[in-house]
Image: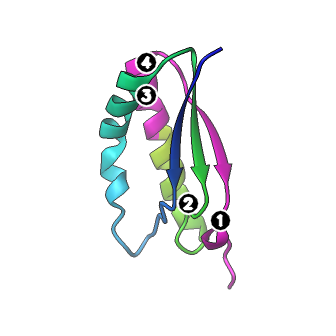
Amino acid sequence: MKVSILHLSDIHFSTTKSNPILGLTEAIACAISGQTCGDNIIIAVSGDIAFSGRKEEYEIAASFFEDLQLKIYQRTNILPNLIIVPGNHDCDFK
């Protein structure tokens, strides 16, 4: 089985700072669809999904990843699996 892996790291979704990656789901989907081989796509997210571990930041992240999965599926007919590993910014220390 061949697998394509999209690796994202240190996104730092925030409610107070702009998140330029939010506008890039179409471009990312286009890039991976041109490189996809096999019948499985994994989106691996390694650390620092959020800026400060707040619930609202994860809501932004969830929306982003759902949109990215959908756009990749529309281009490849493969629904990507998500693997997410938290980092030090992913904890709310308050």
Outermost residue on the bottom side: it is: 94
Question: Residue 74: image x %, image y %?
Answer: 40, 21
In front of the other: 93 or 43: 43
The amino acid type, in three-letter code, at marker 4 is Thr
The amino acid type, in three-letter code, at marker 2 is Ile
Is label 2 in contact with label 1 (beta carbons under 8 Å)?
A: yes
Is label 1 in contact with label 3 (beta carbons under 8 Å)?
A: no
Q: Is residue 39 left or right of residue 35?
A: right
Circle nearer the N terminus (2, 4) = 2
Q: Could you say whether the residue bearing mark 2 is in a helix, strand or loop?
A: loop
Is label 3 in contact with label 4 (beta carbons under 8 Å)?
A: yes
- The residue at which mark 2 appears reads as 49
- The residue at which mark 3 appears reads as 72
The residues bearing labels 2 and 1 have C-alpha atoms spaced at a distance of 7 Å
> Residue at left 65%, top 65%?
87
- The residue at which mark 1 appears reads as 87
The residues bearing labels 2 and 3 have C-alpha atoms spaced at a distance of 20 Å
Is 78 colored magenta in this rendering? Answer: yes
Span shown in magenta: 67-94
